[in-house]
Image (cartoon, grey):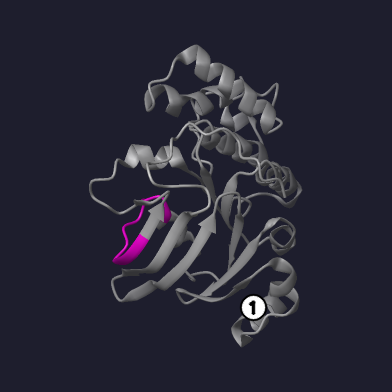
Amino acid sequence: MATSAPTSGAAAPSGWTPDQPLIRIRDVHKSFGANVILGGITFDVMKGEVICLIGPSGAGKSTLLRCINALVPIDSGSILVENQEVHDPKLDKLALRRKVGMVFQQYNLFPHRTALQNVMMAPIHVLRRDKHEVEALARALMRKVRLEGKEDSYPGELSGGQQQRVAIARSLAMQPDVMLFDEVTAALDPETVKEVLVTIRELAEEGMTCMLVTHEMGFAREIANQIYFTDRGIVVEHGPPAEFFTNSRDPRTRKFLSQIL
């Protein structure tokens, strides 16, 4: 996999270097009432790595992504992005969102805005960047996700896979250092899944750091540097795909894989 990373608009804070973890997760706990969602998650994500999180529903995978992007507060533990504590009350959340892009299962596009306008909105209204500069970037991103010619289409005129690719372009428009993908193909028809996965694969090949919650095991095997299997809020087992899928050790991992492969 390529190691050259795309240019990012978010400057790393003083003290962080690319040989350190881009994301550092330590003993993260999160509960909703009596329901323990994360029971002590610990691992690192290095710059340029692709991490796939797999596991049964309710295992805490999506919650962990939301905690990394400070959309959900943690109860205890630590999440650092480029040496900055995500849950520090003093942290500028806008600065964090510039570093950490996130794409959800639902596209969340503005239906009354064209595809191009959806991609342009955050850089113009949040980052206050020049409209002409942003439009040039947005058009380049539309080409990147293979939607050239759809710039003036409204979301309702696009397929689910096309809308999801617009959502990816919209997140990339903030020029993040890491991309989080939360089951982005789960709501798609089978014939449109591939076009979204190709887009993610190309980002990974260009060196974008990615974390994916996915049920696409073949894709995870192909793209990931590390697979993390979570169950009941903990990391049960992890390893590179070749080892994970052929030589898993924990009975819970083997049972899960036997049900989906």
Residue name at image x 60 percent, y 83 percent:
252
Specify whether 241 is left or right of 93.
right
Give the image quarter of residue 92: top left
Q: Magenta stretch containing residue 50, yes or no?
A: no
The chief SS type of the magenta part is loop
As rendered, which of 258 and 84 lies closer to the eye? 84
Report whether residue 261 is seen: no
Q: How many marks?
A: 1
Query: Which residue is at 67% across, 34% downward?
Result: 145
Quadrant in which residue 33 is drawn: bottom left
Residue drawn at x 53%, y 58% as measured from the top left: 45
- Local packing at callout 1 (Cα closer than 10 Å; few below 14, some 14-19, many 20+) is some
Disc 1 is placed on an element classified as: helix
Q: Which residue is mark 1?
A: 256
What residue do we see at 75% from left, 69% from top? 242
Residue type of the residue flagged with mark 1: Phe
> Which range is magenta?
68-78
